Amino acid sequence: MSGQWAKLMVLGVVLSGLCLPARANTTGAESGVVTSPVDLSTTEKTVSIALLLPIRSEILRVPSEVLRAGFQAAYERERGGITINIVETGDSAQDIVSGYKAASALNDVVVGPLSRTGVTAVVQSDAVAKPTIALTPPDPAENGEIKLPPQMLVIGLSIEEEARQVAEWALHDVKKGKALVLFTQAAWQRRAAKAFETQWQQRGREMEAIEVPANDGFLNGRSLLQLKKQVEADKPAILFLALDARQARQVRAVMGKDIALYGTSQLNPTALTDRVTAEPLAEMDGTRLLDIPWQLQPDHPAVMTYPRLVVEADQKRNADHERLYALGIDAYRIAREIADRHTNFELDGVTGKLKVRIDQGQARFERVTQQAVYREGSVVGVGEAR
């Protein structure tokens, strides 16, 4: 879900019971290709798009089903000239590469893989010969960023990119002063902290990164009290919280409201549709963060167009699943544009303002995420009335 993908994928093993759209009709079972029903009333030439997901993975099955539901919701709104094929794999690199090769051989555009290891395996296989829309970044190479094939576009919800955008926001708001960056041993938090640190220091600003001990997701209270003394002595301009919402509440409770807090979408644990009825987190008021329009803007034109992910009546909505569902919607919209041979386009998407440029054998993607703030205990878009 997720940069945040590692955290999101772990959720898949414990969250179940999602009421998702019915599975498409199956053909070619041995190849793992599942084909959506085709409208036989039309004879127009269609373009085929494969959605490559680790549905056979025990851990990644639920995230895969959630993303597929968003993808199919977008397809149902704009089907003309498109056939979608679901290609199911497990979570092993070999299985994913085999599935990718089958998808690429039989389709015009491939969407996937979903996991970082899967994308890395496909990149290293040298099998990318068709337009491919990866749903998460690959693992970085030892010497930095891995080189992507010319026909691969990466559109995942990157926690690192969120952190870089938060850094630019804070730099604009706070013209001088030091930033303290807080994180735990969690891999996604380390990545977010490093991305913020790099962006902040590139602008010549001072910062200090602090790993806070945590147990079962809770920050160590004694370490927070020591941190409070450091904050009172150093008087940093901001704290960047590469933390989740529960941990951020701990920080705010100890630090008080005199210091500015910034963070990523992981500071927002509530689905948009639950915002009115959720318990208000008044202690978080003033905390700034980023999140996607699907989570913030009910009157957004694209958000209003698509149905919400359906869950059982007794189930609480999961914010990371909502983001993944939204990614599925935008993944289909981008794939459709590329299938129509558009190489330079922008979309006001449910995951942000999206920009795609494909030229001279290089694919570039940019997402600008929505700024938000805690107000009266709820997360609202900046400039939005509660």
Image (tube, grey):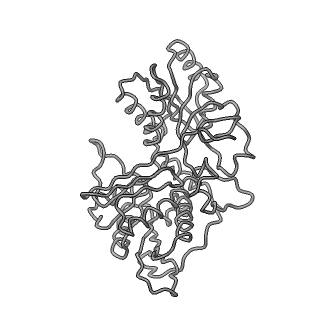
State whether residue 3 is above or below residue 259.
below
The quarter of the displayed image where residue 151 is located: bottom left
Q: Nearer the viewer, residue 1 or 224?
A: 1
- 103 sits to left or right of 258: left
Q: Position of residue 121 (x, y in %)?
A: 33, 58
Q: Nearer the viewer, residue 62 or 192?
A: 192
State whether residue 218 is above or below residue 324.
above
The residue at 45%/20% (across/down) is: 178
State whether residue 289 is above or below residue 109.
above
Question: Farthest residue toward the left?
Answer: 360
- 129 sits to left or right of 95: left
The residue at 61%/70% (across/down) is: 21
State whether residue 92 is above or below residue 36.
above
The quarter of the displayed image where residue 377 is located: top right
Q: Position of residue 356 (x, y in %)?
A: 38, 55
Q: Position of residue 253 (x, y in %)?
A: 65, 26
The tally of labels here is 0
- 118 sits to left or right of 151: right
- 280 sits to left or right of 267: right
Q: Quadrant of the C terminus?
A: top right
The residue at 45%/77% (across/down) is: 81
Q: Nearer the viewer, residue 382 or 133?
A: 382
Q: Position of residue 44 (x, y in %)?
A: 43, 83
Q: Nearer the viewer, residue 197 or 187?
A: 197
